[in-house]
Amino acid sequence: MKKIIKSNIRRLRFDADEMTQQELADKVGASRQTIVAIEKGKYSPSLELAFKISDVFHKQINEVFMYEED
């Protein structure tokens, strides 16, 4: 089976006072469309962007992103 990167971003945004996709995008220097695509599993973030997103939520990278079978 094919492996893909999955994320907990949607849940983490909700837990962070319902942070919007745009607010997260602004904090990490990405577009809202990029955040949407990552949340939907349509786009794998660069390592740098993955670390930036993890930092926003004060989480370890493996608490935000998982490499799992599709």
Image (cartoon, rainbow, N blue to C red):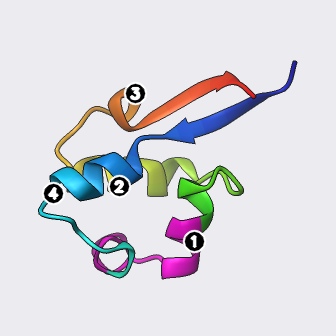
**Disc 1 to disc 3: CB gap under 8 Å:** no
Distance of mark 1 from mark 4, alpha carbons?
19 Å
Could you tell me what secondary structure mostly forms the magenta stretch?
helix
Query: Viewer-nearest of labels 1 and 4?
Result: 4
Q: Is residue 8 magenta?
A: no
- Residue with the mark numbered 3: 62
Distance of mark 2 from mark 1, alpha carbons?
12 Å
Quick one: SS at disc 1? helix
Distance of mark 4 from mark 2, alpha carbons?
13 Å
Mark toward the start of the polypeptide (4 vs 2):
4
Quadrant occupied by the C terminus = top right
- Residue with the mark numbered 4: 16
- Residue with the mark numbered 2: 53
Query: Viewer-nearest of labels 4 and 2?
Result: 4
Q: Is residue 35 magenta?
A: yes
Residue beneath the point at 58% across and 53% down? 46
Residue type pointed to by label 2:
Ile
Q: Can residue 35 be seen in this snapshot?
A: yes
Coordinates of residue 57 in the picture (x, y in percent): 21, 50
Q: In screen coordinates, is 41 left or right of 36?
A: right
